[in-house]
């Protein structure tokens, strides 16, 4: 059995990023191996991204910039084996798009994926790519108090990094407009 722990700060960041964004939002997280059967998520982050009610796209340039800045500051990037995103007010489940995203992440020996929503429901899974291909559902149960300072930092970070995309469709002319 594999146990998954998450630090208080990482869990609260996940909750606050989800709570403050009216659309989908996604990000990365760091994980470390505590023992043979225990992994621990110890940080959650967001990158610059374009989002809508049904999508969050991590831009390849933003990801490259993010990783470049980490390496330039002598930060270890090998612990980024967590991918998370919200489904806003929908149920937390792995959609076919989510499955394809996970399947395209085989550069890692494993990946922890989290889908969450504003109600605090989560689906968590561990995908192992080498030496065997396995998917293992995981559970994380926490009851934590609010951290007002961290909550404010997360709200500011969303305002800086998350660009909302709204699409307006007209029936008559069948035109679509994207507002960034």
Image (spheres, rainbow, N blue to C red):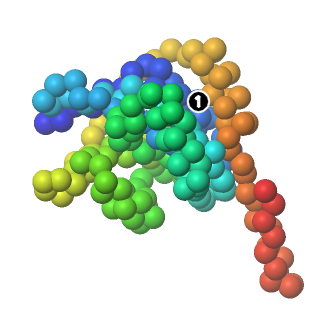
Q: Nearer the viewer, residue 66 or 141?
A: 66
**Left or right of 138: which side holds 142?**
right
Q: Residue at x 51, y 28 (%)?
A: 73
Q: How far across and how far down the image is residue 25, in percent? A: 58, 46
User: 141 or 59: which is nearer to us?
Assistant: 59
Which residue is at a point 63% across and 14% down the rendered structure image? 149
Q: How many marks?
A: 1
- Which image quadrant: the C terminus? bottom right
Residue in the image at 39% along x and 21% along y? 7
| Quarter of the image where one finds residue 153 | top right
- Left/right of residue 67 with respect to residue 52 in the rendered view: left
- 150 vs 16: above or below: above
Q: Position of residue 168 (x, y in %)?
A: 80, 68
Q: Dividing the picture into quarters, in which one does residue 167 lie?
A: bottom right
- Residue under label 1, please give it: 16
Query: Quadrant of residue 165 in the image?
Result: bottom right
């Amino acid at each position: 059995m594999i146990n998954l722990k998450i630090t208080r700060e990482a869990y609260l960041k996940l909750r606050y990023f989800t709570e403050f964004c009216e659309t989908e939002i996604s990000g990365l997280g760091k994980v470390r191996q505590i023992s043979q059967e225990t992994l621990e998520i110890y940080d959650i982050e967001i990158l610059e991204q374009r989002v809508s009610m049904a999508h969050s796209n991590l831009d390849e340039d933003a990801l490259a910039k993010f990783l470049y800045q980490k390496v330039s500051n002598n930060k270890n990037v090998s612990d980024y084996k967590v991918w998370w995103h919200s489904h806003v007010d929908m149920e937390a489940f792995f959609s076919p798009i989510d499955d394809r995203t996970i399947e395209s992440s085989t550069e890692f020996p494993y990946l922890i994926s989290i889908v969450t929503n504003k109600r605090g429901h989560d689906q968590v899974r561990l995908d192992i790519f080498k030496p065997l291909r396995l998917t293992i559902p995981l559970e994380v149960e926490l009851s934590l108090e609010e951290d007002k300072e961290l909550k404010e930092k997360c709200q500011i970070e969303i305002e800086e990094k998350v660009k909302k995309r709204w699409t307006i469709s007209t029936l008559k002319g069948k035109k679509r407009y994207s507002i960034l």
